[in-house]
Image: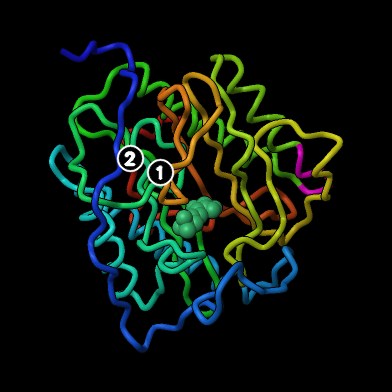
Amino acid sequence: MMDPHRAPVGNIQPGKLSPIRNVPKHIERPEYMFHDGPEVVTASDVKSPEIIEKIREAGTIAADALYTAGDSIKPGVTTDELDRIAHEYMCDHGAYPSCLGYMGFKKSICTSVNEVICHGIPDDRPLEEGDIVNLDVTAYKNGVHGDTNAMFYVGEVDTESKLLCERTYTAMMRGIKAAKQGREINIIGRVIESYAKRFNYGVVEDFTGHGVGEAFHSGLIVPHYDTAPLHNDLIEPGMVFTIEPMLTMGAIAWDQWDDDWTVLTKDHGRSAQWEHTILVKEDGFEILTLPSQGQKSAAMPEL
Ligand code: MF3
Ligand code: CO
Ligand code: CO
């Protein structure tokens, strides 16, 4: 019997992948689909109003695909089915699912369950009562990407896991609010880390936020822990980047499966993540990856 308060130690195993999904011919592909290896895109991290509007459109499609898939989450549903739903939503809205074919990734979204930190590949594993799952969706349209992720509960979830999910959301929002012009990028991680440490959570260091827009990952790095005096890029109005902290219940040491993607905690303690693409403004910020109908996950706290 599951203890209703304590998070279980996980034992997740790789599943089987379904065949590669088709994207209609008329949908524009990102440039990395035309060659091997990393993307080759050069663009400033400070965006024009025209590019910002396009990122807002791609970001809204990504968020709506995410919450459309999220609506179907319940025990017994496979992560492959969630991938199918998000894939079809993006294609139906004229967007390319950025993950599909990115550096050899074979699915349209990432699904990271329980102790999986990030980059889980959708497969035939049915979700189980008590699981927590992250859906990470990136959509490409009109030459730009919008990138977002969120946590969901599968049925009844234990108290510790719920607190981890909610506090990770709060950590992301604190990082977003700290991203003010004139400060260094490292303010974001300092704020996130100091909040996470109140609860003794681990703050994953080896996967970071990033500049996003014409490129999926622009080269600008946004750490979620305090790296000062490193990562001292000045935050400027018009900058667009993601903030996507991963917090762990235990240690941050990680392993990777032989699929070359799935990253999970070595101690099999649970991990949670939230992500938004944000725009820095003269007087604050705008989230460019809000769902169009204000959909929420039960794993999102009332702030
Ligand atoms: N969306 C992830 C991020 O937040 C990147 C996923 S890359 C993939 O940066 F290839 F795994 F899809
Ligand atoms: Co990202
Ligand atoms: Co993402």
Q: Which residues are magenta?
A: 181-186
The residue at which mark 1 appears reads as: 150
| Residue 53, placed above or below residue 211 | below
Give the quadrant of residue 22.
bottom left
Q: Position of residue 161 (x, y in %)?
A: 36, 22
| Residue 115, placed above or below residue 297 | above
Residue that extends furthest to the bottom in the rendered view of this protein: 26
| Type of amino acid at the residue the image marks with label 2 | Ser
Left-right relation of 251 to 66: right
Badge 1 element: strand
The residue at which mark 2 appears reads as: 297
Q: Residue at x 55, y 27 (%)?
A: 252
Kindly report the secondary structure that dominates the magenta region of the rendered protein.
Answer: loop
Q: How busy is the neighbourhood of tag 1: few (under 14 within 10 Å), some, or many (20 plus)?
A: many
| Residue 113, placed above or below residue 247 | below
Viewer-proximal residue among 139 and 123: 123
Left-right relation of 100 to 84: right
Badge 2 element: loop
- Residue 87 shown in magenta: no
Can residue 34 be spotted in the picture? yes
Left-right relation of 227 to 115: right
Viewer-nearest of labels 1 and 2?
1
Q: Position of residue 12 (x, y in %)?
A: 30, 33
Q: Earlier in the sequence, mark 1 or mark 2?
A: 1
Image quadrant where one finds the N terminus: top left
